[in-house]
Image: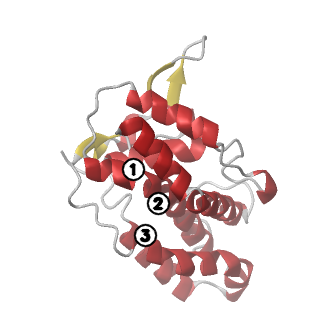
Amino acid sequence: MTDTLPKFHNVNYRYKQFKCAFKNANPENLEDAKLAIHFVEKNILLFKHLNLNKLPVRVCHNDTKLNNILFSKTNKALCLIDLDTIMKGTFLYDFGDAVRTIVNSAAEDEKDLTIINFNIDLFEAFVDGLAVNEDFLIQNEKELLPISVVLMPFLHGIRALTDYLENNKYYKVTYKSQNLDRCFSLFTFTQLAINNQELMKQIIFKKLN
């Protein structure tokens, strides 16, 4: 299978893009983004030893946010839509990306960071849904599911921050600082996912083992 978007979820690649954007950014953008920049530098170390190469290569959607799931009129999930990102990957990408939009009711570019939330009951219900299906995950995948919930919002956040530092060349924006708002919102959720690591591990162990 050909990669539709090479290195799409490669955290080291996204970090290199960020460092290049940081080097060339104008001083005003750097000042406005200094808290987000600090968050990246502080938390990139979480993924330094994250080795996904030994995980099974699967056919993945790679963009499993909630609004890419088609629901029936009775609110039953029917299928994934927006299939242009389908390519090989690891199940962690799809799991982490789904969780970040399912357990948080706030918008991705929410300005009021106090309303960003991590609903652990919704997380448990999502894992319940995974558990009723055939047990196709290997042990290494199960063990890494909690960190995937940190990885995916961090990746989206660093991409939004990089785009802001590059004066909004990639994402569509309706106002200048929208990408900055996106990254602050995503990094706030990332921190909540970090805070809930142990609880996620307990739920996954209980439901999937």
Side of 121 where 18 appears, left or right: left
Mark 3 lies on a secondary structure that is helix
Q: Nearer the viewer, mark 1 or mark 3?
A: 1
Q: Which mark is residue 146?
A: none
> Badge 1: few (under 14), some or many (20 or more) residues near its Cα, within 10 Å?
many
Residue 194 in sight from this viewpoint: yes
Quarter occupied by residue 138: top left
Give the CA distance from mark 2 to mark 3: 12 Å
Task: Find residue 152 and report its horizontal and vertical position in percent.
Answer: 48, 56
Identity of the residue drawn at 61% across and 76% down: 39
Give the residue type at disc 2.
Leu
**Residue 63 seen in the current view:** no
Q: Earlier in the sequence, mark 1 or mark 3?
A: 3
Where residue 102 sits, quadrant-wise, is: top right
Residue 172 x/y as whole percent:
61, 54
Q: Which residue is mark 1?
A: 93
Assess disc 2: are there few (<14), some (14-19) or many (≥20) residues with their C-alpha within 10 Å of its C-alpha.
Answer: many
Q: Nearer the viewer, residue 58 or 159?
A: 58
| Direction from residue 131 to residue 137 in the image, left or right | left
Point out the image quarter for the C terminus.
Answer: top left
Q: Which residue is mark 2?
A: 151
Answer with mark 2 or mark 1, whichever residue precedes in sequence. 1
Q: Are marks 2 and 3 in contact (CB under 8 Å)?
A: no
Q: Secondary structure at mark 2?
A: helix
Q: Amino acid at mark 1?
A: Tyr
Residue drawn at x 74%, y 53% is 110
Q: Nearer the viewer, residue 205 or 154?
A: 205
Q: Of 73 and 208, which appears nearest the observer?
A: 208
As displayed, is residue 113 above or below residue 81? below
Residue tagged 3: 14
